[in-house]
Amino acid sequence: MSLSETRPSDRTAAAVQIKGWRVGELVLDTVLMRVLRDGVPLAIDRRGIDLLFHLAENAGRTVSKDALIAVAWPGRVVSENSLVKAISKLRQALGDGDGDCLQVVHGYGYRLVCVVESLAAVHEAIREPAVETPAGHAEAVANQSRHWLHAGGLLLVLLGLLWAVVLLTDIETKDRTATDASRTYDVVAFLPLRDASANGGLALYADGLSNYLRDQFGSVPALRMIHRAESQRYRGDRRPPGDLARELGADLLVTGEVSQVEGQLRVDLQLFDARGRIPPWRQIFQRLPGDQATLFEDIKGALLAAIADQKGRWGHDQSSGRGTTNDAAYQAFLRAATLFSGNNDPNNQRRAIVLLQRAVELDPNYADALLTLGGIYGGSGYYADTVDELLEGRKRAIASMNRGIELAPDDPANYLLRSEMQLLYLFDVEAAWADLRAAADRTPGGESARLLVWHARLLASLGRIDEAIETGARAIALDPAAGARRNQGWHYLAKGDTRNARAVLMLQLVDLPENPHTNFYLALCDIYEGQPEAALQRLELSSTLFRLLGTVIAQHERGDHAASDIALQKLIDQFAIPDGYWIGAAYAWRGELDQAFHWIERAIEGGDSSAAYLLFDPLLANLRDDPRYQRLVDRVGLGEPLGRKS
């Protein structure tokens, strides 16, 4: 298949503004970081996206292998074979198996030879499936639209709703700085650093530093990165920073240049705050070429301190009950922040825990450090080497959250996090509801998308799946970009409704194209619909945990039991302590009930948070007629399983 061929689609369309390039029949969208054919997003992993976008930026020119490796694996040393495999995988996804468009230049690199057209502001049709309205949702809307049914008017209503969702998402993407001042994150753009050397020989160094900073700050809490490909469009743009920030939709803009002065590397870095909270910041760093490692660390530390020193948000504002006056505690907190923000690397989690414990020792009233520490202890649990260590971490999580909330009692997000912990680790439904109500009391209007997302998850964990779906629909209507569709898809799967599950999950991919849960749930849709081969391709876009779990299931459905066994053993080897529940789910799918019950019982005893899925998880369908299943349900005491009397 060539890039000029299109794929048929019978799904509905909605117009949305695209920025990027047209390559043959493909559209490369640099705002939402996706590739479309005939309006349908293609399944391409992040590395493939980075490679393709960089080649499009340099269309017609040969790009060296070293340059492509630096783009796709910034800061890492990989072999050329890794690049060859990534290019091959990208060609398959594009339908360019013969290399007619993405050509190899033997001995040097690759070149994109198709005609590339810039799309500064073109309206493309995004094909989306219609989503059924959950039962019981918005009865007034149903009454108003009932008379349209026989005339086909319901289709028009659904199309209108889909267009509203896409439009709201597009507006949110383009004008992030217009959101309310109470939001708890900043959107940051790192523009490519300019090569200001006399001979132009520091371009790769400048790009490497830009990529390093973007990667490092991508793990900092309360920051969201504008993707590299979108920032690259402003390479060398000399307009005022306020204009650039506004056009990019950035709160914070990082710019600068790299040069060489008297044999030393010189980096001139600047930070602009479009919201006016930080005075214009500029700092010059100069080192001998052999001191690049310390130079990078010093730049990161100085920039992080500049961003962090915002009154009432990161720094030393005591009037809000946040921050600390102890500079050593503050610096420890900042170093921990660069290591962890939902980061599942065990070493980074352990290092962040040590730093945050140090910050709390230096200032026992440091609410931010306590709350972040609670979040790590109460997260994935990959820091734990034993079940006992994981259980102790769960206790410390709630203790840290209790103290943090006592010191800073006004943030509803902290009550939601503690509510989750009360349910997932203690199975304390009453305490979970109490924290949910406390969060609502501290939320303007008593309702937010984030609050509704957790409310829906809580309802699902209690076996009240229809209520969960209705509540999730309210969250989506309130804020389409809040991530509620991911959970909504999982809840539809619990009912065996793959049509609505797939519809809502495909919409979620617009905002979160690489979310591991979303891609795993879509792979489950494929499996339920008899397409295990498609599921295996989709699972490559998920996390290691879900890729292995999905592979166990998909290979079992294909009849390749040896491949299923291999994936299951890898799942056990890597995730037995923090994620034993999913090992039990894999055995349950394969009909090996004794092993399934063994692992799920172990998960409940070991503080595995996924045990809260017990009442509705569709992967456990083979267990529900076994008396041991009801004993597990009684043990956790959350409610009645899906399909039973509630």
Image (cartoon, rainbow, N blue to C red):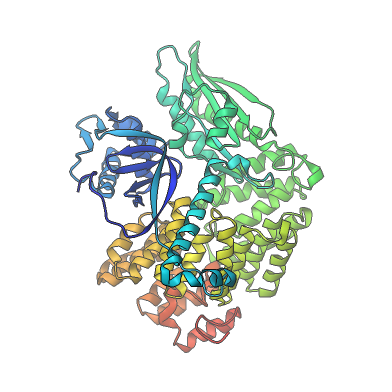
For this view, does 43 lie left or right of residue 576?
left
> From the viewer's perspective, is residue 201 above or below residue 129?
above
**Residue in the image at 48% along x and 13% along y:** 263
**Residue in the image at 45% along x and 69% along y:** 582
Q: Position of residue 115 (x, y in %)?
A: 27, 33
In the rendered image, which quarter contains the C terminus? bottom right
**Residue in the image at 57% along x and 28% along y:** 243
> From the viewer's perspective, is residue 408 above or below residue 431?
above
Q: Position of residue 323 (x, y in %)?
A: 74, 43
Residue 594 in sight: no
In front: 387, or 544? 544
In front: 639, or 167? 167
Q: Position of residue 302 (x, y in %)?
A: 62, 30
> From the viewer's perspective, is residue 594 above or below residue 574?
below
Q: For residue 476, what is the image quadrant?
A: bottom right
In front: 179, or 490? 179
Q: For residue 307, what is the image quadrant?
A: top right
Task: Name the outermost residue toward the bottom.
Answer: 627
> From the viewer's perspective, is residue 301 above or below residue 381?
above
